[in-house]
Image: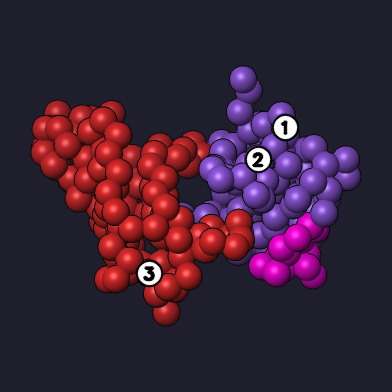
Amino acid sequence: QKEVEQDPGPLSVPEGAIVSLNCTYSNSAFQYFMWYRQYSRKGPELLMYTYSSGNKEDGRFTAQVDKSSKYISLFIRDSQPSDSATYLCAMSSNTGNQFYFGTGTSLTVIP
Amino acid sequence: EAGVVQSPRYKIIEKKQPVAFWCNPISGHNTLYWYLQNLGQGPELLIRYENEEAVDDSQLPKDRFSAERLKGVDSTLKIQPAELGDSAVYLCASSLGAGHANNEQFFGPGTRLTVL
């Protein structure tokens, strides 16, 4: 079993839709949860960074962490064509710098 | 401020040939990472440096892969000899370092390697 599971998609939505992206994990030691966005032929860039459980909002993006279920989500409101990219979840424990990435979900927002 | 710089961006070689990738991290970042990213997959850590010390190289295939960060700044990753299965994107990332509350990793654009 992989440390982090993520549905690869692809996911296609119309402009303005609400997008929900999810990851599950097996390691209860994970405390830091991140969402990265990766455009084609570019490196990943950090979108959201959450410590432990709870919600975090930044503009149109909301990250949720449910440690009891080992489940994290990223919501994108009012999706735009410029949001079309691959979204990677990543996690790490309290003690180290080892990041465990999901496989990424490919998102296309259709104008 | 310049981001993480990697070169070359693309490399095509024949199998059994050597290849090297170069990375210059963000100024002041003590931690440097090399990742391997296959198509449709997330990045997988190959090696992590704290300054010039390799502190995690457990996933680096040491029979053919080597890396160095001699002065604790830029780094090179080498494959010798390359195999067909090494075709992938090699990503470099850097961060401030262990002990920082927000140890965000900043990624470079990657080097796309094709082995024929």
Chain B: give its colour.
Answer: purple
Q: Nearer the viewer, residue B77 or B1?
A: B1
First reached walking from the N terminus: tag 2 or tag 1: 1
Chain A: give its colour.
Answer: red
Q: Nearer the viewer, residue A85 or B86?
A: A85
Q: CA distance from mark 2 to mark 1?
A: 7 Å
Which residue has dot 3 on it?
Answer: A25
Task: Please give the range of residues in magenta.
Answer: B54-66
Circle 1 marks a residue in which chain? B
Q: Nearer the viewer, residue B71 or B46?
A: B71
Q: Residue B114, percent across and down?
A: 60, 50
Q: Nearer the viewer, residue A79 or A107?
A: A79
Q: Are marks 2 and 1 on the same chain?
A: yes
The residue that appears at 38% across and 42% down in the rendered structure is A48
Q: CA distance from mark 1 to mark 3?
A: 32 Å
The chosen color scheme is by chain
The residue that appears at 54% across and 43% down in the rendered structure is B102
Q: Residue A73, percent across and down?
A: 27, 54
Q: Is any atom of residue B104 visible in this view? A: yes
Taking the magenta stretch, the answer to whether it contains residue B64 is: yes
Q: Are marks 1 and 3 on the same chain?
A: no
